[in-house]
Image (cartoon, rainbow, N blue to C red):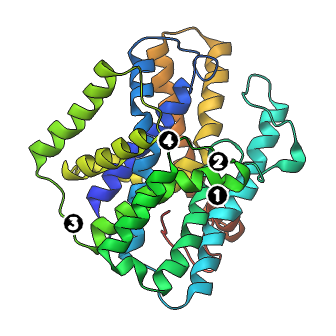
Amino acid sequence: MRDIRIDTLRGLACIFLVGYHVIGNNPSNGLHIESGFLREINDLLETVRMPLFTFLSGMVYAFRPLSENWPKFLKGKARRLLIPMLVVGTLFALIQALVPGTNNKIDNWWLLHIYPVQHFWFVEALFWVFILIIPLELNRLLNSRLVTGLIIAAFLALAVGQPYTKLLAFKGFIYLTPFFLFGMSIVRFKIPPLPLFPSLFGFIGIMAAIYFLTDGVYGRSLLGCVIGMFSCYFLLGLKFQIHWLAKIGIYSYSIYIFHVFFTAASRIIANKLFSVPDEINFVIGLLFGIMGPIAVYLVAKQFPLGKLLFLGESQKKIIKTRF
């Protein structure tokens, strides 16, 4: 049974993410926007995007947590996360190397996936989060609020300075773990969200404080991580039930994996065919980045090998698993 509130927030996270890659993380990428409201909103959401994805992943995990059969659990996560990372991530790197107008070409092919390929760092880092979960769950450490809170606090402390290597997405693993455990805790310990208006004022207040009182907050700093956790909690309290967003959220994994192919393609095509304002280019890129991966999902699921290689799903049956 799907939870429309979780799917709605996943849809929102997809829009935040796709919009980020359409605009670009800096003026040298994406639409090459240096200033204006699109750039300001994009930068403002740095502390929300990946925390929200990971927080929701933790909530979903808590509904179907690890049992005693950890080898089966690990095999399923490896199939779901690592196979699409290797297949689609390699395809993405090849396209970047061959197609003019793309960004961030690979220099050292022998290090491919040892150092993560672009946004595929997330699925690699999330796999390490599940590796960590196994001994914690088997020893029932995560059944204690105190122990879980201490582990979250320890990983938040590790966020100070983030002087960690990107090798095998270790830096991403340090970053994602507290959000995952926080999302899991919300479900496992039945932590109620705040009422609607405190949640709304809390989220708006945090975003306003970042915008008016700072020059921006680095998402992986200690402050950025704390803001990310509060932002997720406030967004959960809004209790959004928006059906069109929830429908997008159902395909969140496919959108995460494939959106960059379509955002890059829309940008290259638009630049060659016509000149329109950045706002129009943004809408076009957003639509391509959402609808394209959904189409890939609908086609790939028709073929057993396609389900395995592109979606990480079992060849035996279609399972709507979610990361």
Q: Nearer the viewer, mark 1 or mark 2?
A: 2
Q: Position of residue 236 (x, y in %)?
A: 25, 52
Q: Which residue is mark 2?
A: 164
Q: Which residue is mark 3?
A: 191
The crowd level at tag 1 (other Cα within 10 Å; few <14, some 14-19, many 20+) is many
* Above or below 3: residue 285: above
Q: Which residue is mark 1?
A: 124
Q: Nearer the viewer, mark 3 or mark 1?
A: 3
The mark found on residue 220 in the picture is: 4
Disc 3 residue type? Ile
Please tell me which of labels 3 and 1 falls first in the chain.
Answer: 1
Residue at disc 2, secondary structure: loop
Total marks shown come to 4
Tell me the quarter of the image containing the N terminus: bottom left
- Is any atom of residue 2 visible in this view? no
Q: Nearer the viewer, mark 4 or mark 3?
A: 4
Please tell me which of labels 1 and 2 falls first in the chain.
Answer: 1
Please tell me which of labels 3 and 2 falls first in the chain.
Answer: 2
Distance between the alpha carbons at the discs numbered 1 and 2: 15 Å
